[in-house]
Amino acid sequence: MPIFEYKCGDCGNEFDLLISNSDKENVRCPECLSTKVEQLLSLFNTGGKRASAAPLKCDTCSLSGG
């Protein structure tokens, strides 16, 4: 099941729910029990590895990663 992020329109509480797509219509705020909730846009992580490691030193500035 996916994790969805919501924000309550009544109390402003932001919360995450592990919920199936079919149950998304029945979401209630866990703080005030309001049904006036808005699903937020969520970023996701695929769990894959990065293609390359970050450079140890920046070529365009004097910052060093080490």
Image (tube, helix red, strand yellow):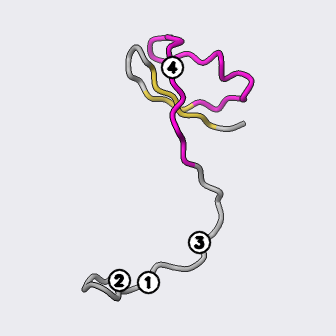
Q: Position of residue 2 (x, y in %)?
A: 68, 38
Say which residue label 2 marks: 66
Circles 3 and 2: CB distance less than 8 Å? no
Tell me if residue 31 comes above or below residue 59 in the rendering: above
Q: Earlier in the sequence, mark 1 or mark 2?
A: 1
Q: Earlier in the sequence, mark 1 or mark 4?
A: 4
Q: Residue sitting at 60 percent across and 76 percent down? A: 51
Q: Position of residue 25 (x, y in %)?
A: 65, 18
Q: Residue sitting at 65 percent across and 57 percent down? A: 46
Viewport quadrant of the N terminus:
top right
In this rendering, which labeled residue sits more in front, label 1 or label 4? 4
Under mark 1, the amino acid is Pro
Residue 52 falls in image quadrant: bottom right
- Report the side of 33 relative to 21 (left or right): left
Whole-angstrom CA distance, mark 3 to mark 2, is 19 Å
Tell me if residue 65 comes above or below residue 36 in the rendering: below
Residue 17 falls in image quadrant: top right
Whole-angstrom CA distance, mark 4 to mark 3, is 35 Å
Q: Which mark is residue 63?
A: none
Whole-angstrom CA distance, mark 2 to mark 4, is 45 Å
Say which residue label 4 marks: 37
Say which residue label 3 marks: 50
- Secondary structure beneath dot 1 equals loop
Q: Assess whether residue 21 is covered by the magenta stretch.
A: yes
Circles 4 and 3: CB distance less than 8 Å? no
Q: Earlier in the sequence, mark 4 or mark 3?
A: 4
Which one is in front, 30 or 61? 61
Under mark 2, the amino acid is Gly
The residues colored magenta run: 17-43
